[in-house]
Image (cartoon, rainbow, N blue to C red):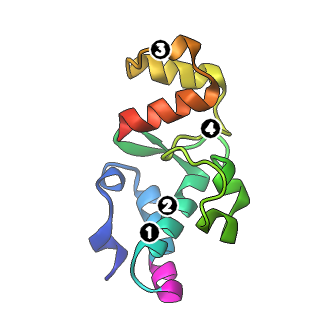
Amino acid sequence: MPARDELPDTLKRSPKKAQETWMKTHDSAVDSYGEGERAHRTAFSSLKHSYEKVGDHWEPKDEKGPSDSRAEKGGAAARRGEGETFGGVDVKGNTKDELYERAKKLDISGRSSMSKKELARAIARKQG
């Protein structure tokens, strides 16, 4: 099935370039791995290199690169679930203060005593 038919809602509300990145990677992954979860994971991994999930959509990151420890590992280690992922929140590219400000806008309680990773987890949960 073409990626355009499977485009997640968060990407439908995102810039066209983000949509194109996801669709191109998804279609290539389907050719390599077949339809299914692995193609979706591959497409999101590619997307998260340049974009970050903010609320209900994806926005370009200030600097391209891995967003979390799982993305840094990549390949087989990432497929095995090694390293933590944060639901599209760019832990590597944001400071603790930046994540705190996002948590504040999302009205996340207890944010003042949270570590950087705890803030990222709370943001990811709140964004759904």
Q: In what quadrant of the picture does the N terminus appear?
A: bottom left
User: In the image, residue 35 lies at what x, y percent?
Assistant: 39, 82
Measure the C-alpha gap from mark 3 to mark 2. Answer: 30 Å
Measure the C-alpha gap from mark 4 to mark 2. Answer: 16 Å
Q: Is residue 61 above or below residue 79?
A: above
Q: Is residue 121 above or below residue 57?
A: above
User: In the image, residue 70 lies at what x, y percent?
Assistant: 65, 54
**Dot 3: within a 10 Å radius of its alpha carbon, few (fewer than 14), some, or many (20 or more) residues?**
few
Q: Give whichever of 44, 81 is nearer the camera.
A: 81
User: In the image, residue 68 lies at what x, y percent?
Assistant: 64, 46
**Labels 1 and 2 touching (C-beta < 8 A):** yes
Residue at the (63%, 63%) spot, across then down:
78
- Residue designated by label 3: 110
Q: Which residues are magenta?
A: 27-33
**Dot 4: within a 10 Å radius of its alpha carbon, few (fewer than 14), some, or many (20 or more) residues?**
many
- Residue designated by label 2: 44
Measure the C-alpha gap from mark 3 to mark 4. Answer: 19 Å
Q: Is residue 65 visible?
A: no
**Dot 1: within a 10 Å radius of its alpha carbon, few (fewer than 14), some, or many (20 or more) residues?**
many
- Residue designated by label 4: 91
Mark 3: secondary structure: loop
Q: Amino acid at mark 2?
A: Phe
In the visual, does 103 lie left or right of 99?
left
* Numbered label attached to residue 40: 1
Q: Earlier in the sequence, mark 4 or mark 2?
A: 2
Measure the C-alpha gap from mark 1 to mark 2. Answer: 6 Å
Q: Earlier in the sequence, mark 1 or mark 4?
A: 1
Q: Nearer the viewer, mark 3 or mark 4?
A: 3
**Dot 2: within a 10 Å radius of its alpha carbon, few (fewer than 14), some, or many (20 or more) residues?**
some
Q: Amino acid at mark 3?
A: Gly
Q: Amino acid at mark 4?
A: Val
Measure the C-alpha gap from mark 1 to mark 3. Answer: 33 Å
